[in-house]
Image (cartoon, rainbow, N blue to C red):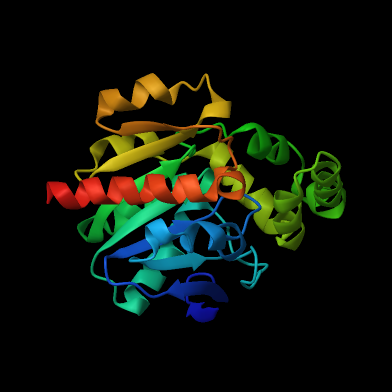
Amino acid sequence: MRRFFSEKAQASVAYADMPGEAGVILFIHGLGCSGIHDYSEVATQPALAAYRRLLVDLPGYGFSDKPAAFSYSVEDQAGVLAELIEALGIPRLAVFGHSMGGAIAISLCARVAERVEALIITEGNLDPGGGFASLRIAQTREDDYIGRQHCAWVDEERAKGNLAWAATLAAASPLAVHRSAASLVEGCAVSWREQLAGFAFPRHYLIGERSLPYPETDRLPKIGVSVEILPGADHNMANHKSAELATAIAGELARVGARR
């Protein structure tokens, strides 16, 4: 695990950097998650062994600092990742984002579009209004969520058997989770869907079979985004279908390479 200091967040950000020569993949995690925890099994699959893989814990999450003064908005988290890309001197990369990380990935790609070879999203937020979890969190007052609801949610997820998410949620800053959720619900001036439609580089969207029916299955191909259904997967596909997810990512990057 490595660290860099983000001027935007005024915080130390933790990331894992796995070597490879085929290209760079940046993994961006979802709400209440951890890139280092959630994507280590995906990133170490043989299908991705040739790539340099960057697994980041966003500020407020996992092993990264949890500054009280940071906004934790989608846009500002994207700004932190842009700092990291610049600090590491990465000229070209593929960007992967899951759920909230999908919205952050889109915002990041808008900042560094000239460097992006491909964007891969798994069930990412594209419109304001949030998803089930983010809307539920954002509807709670910030102080109430921090003081009471965050721990209650962790306990609820443990009781339901969602042990991986419960563990990373427990490690996350309640302030970060609430502000992140509020940002997803609020959206941005130009929606993530509109930004996604305007990108010139290849864009790929993965949906878990167990999440079907899913409206993006039909909607995204109309704006030039390819869609793939991952058999047997649900929303948290990295935790349950790591080998299959890695194979799907590698397959899309191989197709991008063949189109060059």
Name the residue: 66% across, 52% down.
32
Image position, residue 201 (x, y; %) = 21, 46
Query: In the image shown, does 250 or 211 lie closer to the viewer?
Result: 250
Q: Give above or below for 68 relative to 251.
A: below
Identify which residue is drawn at 60% across, 42% down. 236
Q: Going by the image, does 154 lie left or right of 221?
A: right
Residue 108 seen from this side: no
Q: What residue appears at the point 19 percent right and 53 percent down from the top-left corner?
A: 257
203 w.r.t. 220: above or below = below
Tell which residue pokes out farthest to the left in this image. 260
Left or right for 202, reference 172:
left
Question: Within the image, what quadrant is residue 115 found in?
Answer: bottom left
The quadrant of the rendering that contains the N terminus is bottom right
Q: Is residue 150 left or right of residue 85?
A: right
Res. 211 image quadrant: top right
Question: Residue pushed farthest front?
Answer: 46
Q: Is residue 127 above or below residue 66?
A: above
Residue 203: image location, x then y, percent: 29, 41
- Residue 177 appears at what percent x and percent y? 67, 52
State the image quarter where residue 102 is shown. top left
The total of numbered circles placed on residues is: 0
Towards the viewer: 231 or 173: 231
Viewer-side residue, 52 vs 114: 52
Does residue 77 appear to the left or right of 86 in the view shown?
right
Q: Position of residue 53 (x, y in %)?
A: 41, 66
In this rendering, does residue 164 appear at all?
A: yes
Residue at image coords 50%, 56%: 42
Closest to the observer, 27 or 245: 245
